Amino acid sequence: MTPNHINSVQWTQAVGYSRQACARVFRDGGSPVDALTAFGVEADDTEHQDWSRAVDLIATSLCKRPLALAA
């Protein structure tokens, strides 16, 4: 589900990147909390974190960050 305040194209790209990153963490034996930590996202309730929630939180954090412009 795309949040209303985020561009749908940006959200789709962020979710795709987030899924790929979470898949790599999972493949390496990590947990959803490890994936959140890798992106600097604080896990408020570490006992109830699952992969779908981690993907959404990472995608949301990616959409919040300002884009770096080429100099």
Image (cartoon, rainbow, N blue to C red):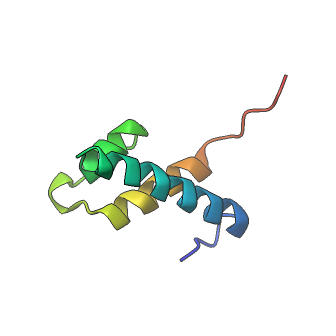
Number of numbered tags placed on the structure image: 0
Q: Nearer the viewer, residue 13 or 61?
A: 13
Outermost residue on the bottom side: it is 1
Residue at 73% x, 33% y is 68
At which x and y percent is residue 1? 53, 77
Q: Does residue 42 appear in this view? A: no
Looking at the image, is 33 positioned above or below residue 13? above
Position of residue 37 in the picture relative to residue 49 (left or right): right
**Quadrant of the image occupied by residue 49:** bottom left
Position of residue 39 in the picture relative to residue 43 (left or right): right
Residue at 80% x, 32% y is 69
Residue at 68% x, 59% y is 10
At which x and y percent is residue 9? 72, 65
**Quadrant of the image occupied by residue 41:** top left
Q: Does residue 11 appear in this view? A: yes
Outermost residue on the right side: it is 71
Position of the C terminus by quadrant: top right
Outermost residue on the top side: it is 71
Position of residue 30 in the picture relative to residue 58 (left or right): left
Outermost residue on the front side: it is 27
At which x and y percent is residue 21? 45, 49
Position of residue 32 in the picture relative to residue 59 (left or right): left
At which x and y percent is residue 17? 55, 53
Q: Nearer the viewer, residue 4 or 24?
A: 24
